[in-house]
Amino acid sequence: MDISAAVRESTSPRIDRVMVEIRRRIASRQLTQGARLPSVRAFAKVMQVSTSTVVEAYERLAADGAIRSRPGSGFYVANAVAPLSLADIGPRLDRAVDPFWVSRLALEDGPDLAKPGCGWMPASWMPQEVLRRAMRTLGRSDAHHLTDYSTPLGYAPFRQFLSGRLADQGIHAGAEQIMLVESGTQAIDHLCRFLLEPGQTVLVDDPCYFNFHALLRAHRVKIVGVPYAPTGPDLTRFEQALEDHHPRLYITNSAIHNPTGAVLSPATAHRVLMLAGRSNMTIIEDDIFADFEEDKAPRLAAFDGLQHVVQIGSFSKTLSASVRCGYIAAPKHWVEPLTDMKIATGFSGSQLSEVLVYSALRDIQYRRHIDAVKARLARARQAAVASLGTLGIVPWIEPDAGIFLWCRLPNGADAATVARHALTRNVVLAPGNIFSQAQAASNFMRFNVSQCDDPRLIEILHGALAETAK
């Protein structure tokens, strides 16, 4: 082997590292089609390698067709840009067990797969008879409900019904201020398209629902986490984040927080609204768990009157995840441009789903079912706290309602390692760092109490914790 070949071989890992970083920037759209790559000298300094290493990496990327060279000008991203890779946007911390990992596993269907880490109740806990009655009613309804596109805002009787439900929460929104969408996630996506430009800043709770992170990365915005306390966001850190980052948007739950189960206090709600108004920041309030409440919690949208707060919700957790239907309640002057956005990106909602959900929610048996589920969840929470406690797994707080327990693992155990071990035994867990923008929850785990009755769970957790301690 000649000297030059030996040098190339010895620097190959460094060359690979440079190539991986350039490909990551292209995949995440940090480097877009036709963009000029950093100069060889500048990138060598960034990557802490020699200029010859960067030259070699660039030449290999050019040979692969990922970039092209313009003599005397530099290197540029080729016309054929790789598809957007959400997994490559943001830091690759805890990448092996990230939101996509958990979501894909939890959505898999298998008789031997236990899912205490998923975000929904088992089918046996859902109002199946209510849904069957609603489907029979739909089958006898007008033909256009079965065949036609929905109206731009969605099925009018359902929007009027939702207006009444919101009024029970102290939120005064006429049917003309409510737009139906296919899910809570789609509601946030529409609002992000409407409100945000790439590079702007969005505040989220830390921890928060992990798909907020994934969705915001797709919109190429800066995500800043604010630590969440038992009564709402840490107000000192919240105010500091406003001063430091000038965010355009804050996304939160206020009824039953995911993943902690905490409830926003009136004092914290008023302070958050005062700070948001001063900063001209919009708040998206996700109210997806409203029907699980025992006592009504404060709603930011009620205090604010839908001025700086937009409320969204859906019925996937309490009625059916298979029937996709949600809503946005927004300021009046937003409704027309939001409707245009809906038509541009999806043309129409599903009238079948809208009429079906409307019929199911009006069924008196739905309310009776929810009352029974809330009592069942209370028993399941008590049982989960007791059984997890035998392993030294303790809740951050003990919620009064909802399906989640946010728990600290004993002896500083790493939740991602525990989750990987549990997966080998067909148990899907939700480790803390997938909920934390700051990656500050490695010792936490979210448990869904409605999915914690599998007799294998405690045994598998015991083995995983023992393995982690080695």
Image (tube, rainbow, N blue to C red):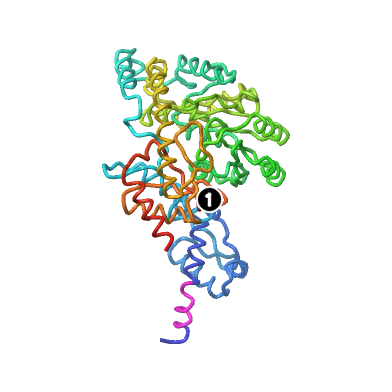
Residue 235's place in the image compared with 62, above or below, is above
Q: Nearer the viewer, residue 198 or 386?
A: 386
* Residue at left offset 34%, top offset 39%: 453
Q: Is residue 11 magenta?
A: yes
Q: Left or right of 38: which side holds 371?
A: left
Quarter occupied by the N terminus = bottom left
Q: Residue 298: percent from the left, percent from the top?
A: 60, 27
- Quadrant of the image occupied by residue 192: top right
Q: Residue 43: percent from the left, percent from the top?
A: 59, 66
Q: For numbered disc 1, what is the local secondary structure? A: loop
Residue 68 appears in the rendering: yes
Question: Most prominent secondary structure in the magenta stretch?
Answer: helix
Q: Residues within 10 Å of mark 1 (few under 14, many from 20)?
A: some
Q: Residue 206: percent from the left, percent from the top?
A: 57, 44
Quarter occupied by the C terminus = bottom left
Q: What are the residue bounds of the magenta stretch?
A: 5-13
Q: Left or right of 34: which side holds 315?
A: left
Q: Is residue 23 magenta?
A: no
Q: Which residue is mark 1?
A: 441
Q: Nearer the viewer, residue 381 or 266?
A: 381
Q: Nearer the viewer, residue 222 or 321?
A: 321
Residue 311's place in the image compared with 141, above or below, is below
